[in-house]
Structures are given as structure tokens and as C-alpha cells.
Amino acid sequence: MANSLLKYYFFTCPSKYKSMSAQIISGKAIAEDMLNGIKSRISQRLSAGKRAPSLAVILVGGDPASSIYVRNKRLACEKVGINSIAYDLASDIKESELFALIQKLNEDDTIDGILVQSPLPPQIDEKLIIEHISASKDVDGFHPYNIGRLAVRQPTLRSCTPFGVIKMLNSANINIKGLDAVVVGVSNHVGRPMALELLLAGCTVTCCHRHTKDLQGNIARADLVVAAAGKAGLIKGDWIKPGAIVVDIGINRLDNGTICGDVDFETAKERAGWITPVPGGVGPMTVATLMENTLLAMELRGV
Ligand code: GUN
């Protein structure tokens, strides 16, 4: 059903019909399709005698969550035919040593993308490291140049999670132009570029953060909620406007080991029109978009 029709249905039908369960957006399935597309683009390149893209993936220390994320990224590279070069560095590495490695990778013409997994240990200034990565190889889309390009409506390499969300909504045929969107969480890597992506897509955007006076009231007015606060259960299901689109970027590990998002999924899905699950929602889109960015970085450099 078209987006506008579904909204009409939710806002005009008697309340007894409004408890219809939300459509679940499977980021996992959409990401699989994306990966297959990237794989065939890369094999076409190889058939034309060009080389495969290459991604340097730098992991500092052995943080368990970071190790899992990095493993997933390296596995995705393998799947699509991107050459991933692993740098697993000791947690006590000096900032100057990491700078030197990035410099070497910046200058290496056979490297198309450079990713430094965050968080980094305290002796390393993450902002300086990100700025040291060549903007043309910044496949995470974290460099101030790339964030600035997005801010002035000339996106180049776009932050993987926010861009992945836009791609996911497009693939699900959900039209967000003109919607009132609320982004919860304003981190440099996710919330802020997410707000810029939504603005670019024609939404009216509100950003909520720790100083926001009325989080519930803002969410209750939103046609589209994007949760990126990193707090399990922060957003209650009965705050959601009936029929709204709910995108949950949070990945939180509970004491019992299970993974959940920032939104109370079970109650929210009874009110939302569309909702993403955690896991299996935005996470796989982030990885697929990283693969696409790596191929794009290579193409933009004319390799
Ligand atoms: N840490 C958590 N998510 C990410 C990501 O998408 N990129 C990097 N570089 N570090 C992360």
C-alpha cells in the first residue's frame, strides 16, 4: 500500500483497527540484495581487467563488540570480492604510530578505503585520527569534509548507518518526503548525519538529546522516529504515533546477553506502520553501505 494511503488508513479508521501490527522492515534482506548487486558490479570490473577494491580495516585493542563488528565487515568484504587488509593493533599503540600507518595507507594507491574502528583507547584522539584519513578514502563518511558535503547538499562519501537507513526506506518503497521526523541521539557518527540525510530527503527534522525537555511529546508528533541514543528501552511503544515509521539504530546488549534496540519493539510494533527489528534491521545496512562506499571511493578516484 502506498505510504500516503497507509497513513490515511491509520489516521481515519476507527481505533479498533489501529492496533494492526506494523510491517517489519527487514534490513537484513535488503542488505543481502545490496551485497549481491555490489558483488556483480565488482565481477564486471574484474572481467574488464580492472582490480578489485581494497579496504584497510584497523582494529585497535580487543574490545569484544568492536571485534565482532570488524569480523562482520571483513566477512562482507570476502562475500562481495573486496580485498580487506586487516590491521589488528595492540591497545597500547601510540597515537603517532597510528598516524604513521594512516599516512602510509593514504599514500598507497592500491588502498581505496580506510576504516578505523571506534571506540579507540584513551591515549588516541579519535577526532584527530578521523581528520587524518584522506577524505577520498573515508569510507565511514566521518571526515568533517564528507559531513560538510552532506550538509551543503552535495553528498560524496556518506556515513554508512544514516545512508543505510535512507537506502533501506527507499528499498521498502516508503516515501519520507514532507514527513515530520524526529532523530533521538546526536552523535557525530550517527545522529547528526542522520538528521542531515533526513533534511536532504525532504523531512522536517527535530533532533532530541539529553537536554530535550519533552522527548515523549516530540516522539508522539513524529511521522518518522529514528532512534540512535544507545539506551535500551528508552522509547516506549505507547509514545509512537499510530502508523508512524520507526527506525531503531540502537544496538544494546542486555545483562542476559540478548541484543535489543532503543525502542520497546513489542509494544511499538502494535502502533507503528513500519518498524525495523534489532537485530536484523539497520545493522546489516551499515555493513552493506560500507561495501558500496568502498567501491564508490575507488570509482571516484578514477581507479
Ligand atoms: N564503531 C561502531 N560503529 C562503527 C562504524 O560504523 N565505523 C567505525 N569506524 N567504528 C564504529
Image: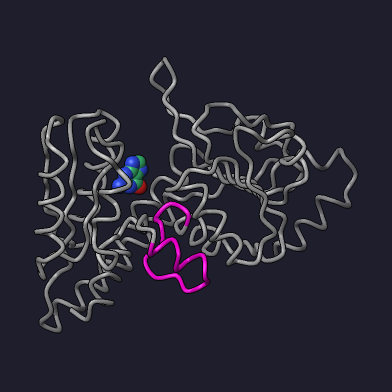
Q: Which residue is located at x 85 percent, y 51 percent?
A: 11
Is 170 situated left or right of 21 in this image?
A: left
Residue positioned most to the bottom: 48
Task: In the rendered view, tell whether residue 175 sits above or below residue 66.
Answer: below
Residue 289: quarter of image: bottom left
Q: Which quadrant of the figure contains the N terminus? A: bottom right
Q: Can you give x and y, in whole percent of width and height, for residue 179 in the image?
A: 71, 59
Is residue 113 shown left or right of residue 223?
left
The residue drawn where x is 39% and y is 64% is: 146
How many numbered marks have been drawn onto this rendered protein structure?
0
Q: Quadrant of residue 248?
A: top right
| Residue drawn where x is 74% and y is 31% of the image | 238
Q: Quadrant of ligand 1?
A: top left
Residue 45 in percent (x, y) is at 19, 78
**Coloring scheme used:** one colour
Looking at the rendering, the stretch of residues picked out in magenta corresponds to: 145-162
Vertical position of residue 219 compared to residue 121: above or below:
below
* Residue 153 counted in the magenta span: yes
Q: Position of residue 199 (x, y in %)?
A: 61, 62
Left or right side of 5 for 167 = left
Q: Nearer the viewer, residue 303 or 25?
A: 303
Question: For residue 265: magenta?
Answer: no
* Quadrant holding the C terminus: bottom left
- Residues 239 and 186: in front is 186
Residue 94's image quarter? top left
User: In the image, is residue 165 above or below residue 97?
Assistant: below
